[in-house]
Amino acid sequence: MTTLPLNLNLATRPLRNRRFFKTAIWGLAGLIAVLAGLSAFVLLKYGGRDRRVKAVNAEALRLQQTARAEEQRLENLIRKAETDSKLRVGLANSIILKKSFRWTELFSALEKSLPDPSYITALNPAFTADGSLAMHIRVTSRGREDLSTFITNLVARGFKDIKVAGELRTDEGRLIAEIDLRYERAL
């Protein structure tokens, strides 16, 4: 039996203490394993929460779109109701305006404007959108001087937009004039 010689020459191959490095490597490997386990736990735990948050967010967006559609529908209903009520309110206001119109003031102003030998043979009034009264009247007078005096008197009493639409002489020599004008009453 041959025995191997014992090599005791430490100068060529010195003994190294590697226990600290092996322990550090195993500790680092254990730390990495623990961190990997924690990462997996966090991923599983918060990944489920992330899916739930995304689902809640999608539901909130769907509700928001539904609310916008409902808001648009309600705005359209409001606009339609406003339009309908504007027509009814306008009608009621026009009725009130016509009922509160002082016809005696108008006829008094027309009578005071007429020269003595002239008279009105036709009167066609119509209320305008701005609340004034547009009229088409037919006046019979002796001549153009009386017609000119009538128009001057109308202007003095606040009648506006006076236009002579046409003139006609009768067999008796009287002048018949068609006049368009506007009367704005004081409220």
Image (cartoon, rainbow, N blue to C red):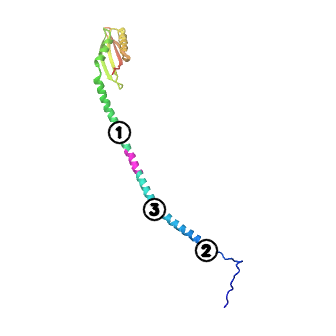
Q: Is residue 61 above or below residue 182?
A: below
Earlier in the chain: of badge 2 and badge 1, it is 2
User: Magenta stretch: residue 77 in it?
Assistant: no
The foreground one among 151 and 95 is: 95
Q: Is residue 123 above or below residue 93?
A: above
Q: Tell me if residue 92 can be seen.
A: yes
Q: Position of residue 125 (x, y in %)?
A: 31, 21
Question: Crowding at label 1, few (<14), some or many (≥20) Cα neighbours within 10 Å?
Answer: few
Q: Which residue is mark 1?
A: 78
The span shown in magenta is 61-70
Q: Is residue 72 above or below residue 100?
A: below
Q: Residue at x 32, y 30 (%)?
A: 90
Q: Which residue is mark 3?
A: 45
Numbered badge on residue 163: none
Q: Quadrant of the C terminus?
A: top left
In the image, which is nearer the foreground, mark 2 or mark 1?
2
The foreground one among 175 and 151 is: 151
Question: Crowding at label 2, few (<14), some or many (≥20) Cα neighbours within 10 Å?
Answer: few
Q: Main secondary structure of the magenta part?
A: helix
Quarter of the figure with residue 142: top left
Going by the numbered disc 2, the residue's amino acid type is: Arg
Q: Position of residue 27 (x, y in %)?
A: 56, 70
Label 2, secondary structure: give it.
helix
Numbered badge on residue 19: 2
Mark-to-mark CA distance, 2 and 1: 85 Å
Label 1, secondary structure: give it.
helix
Outermost residue to the bottom = 1
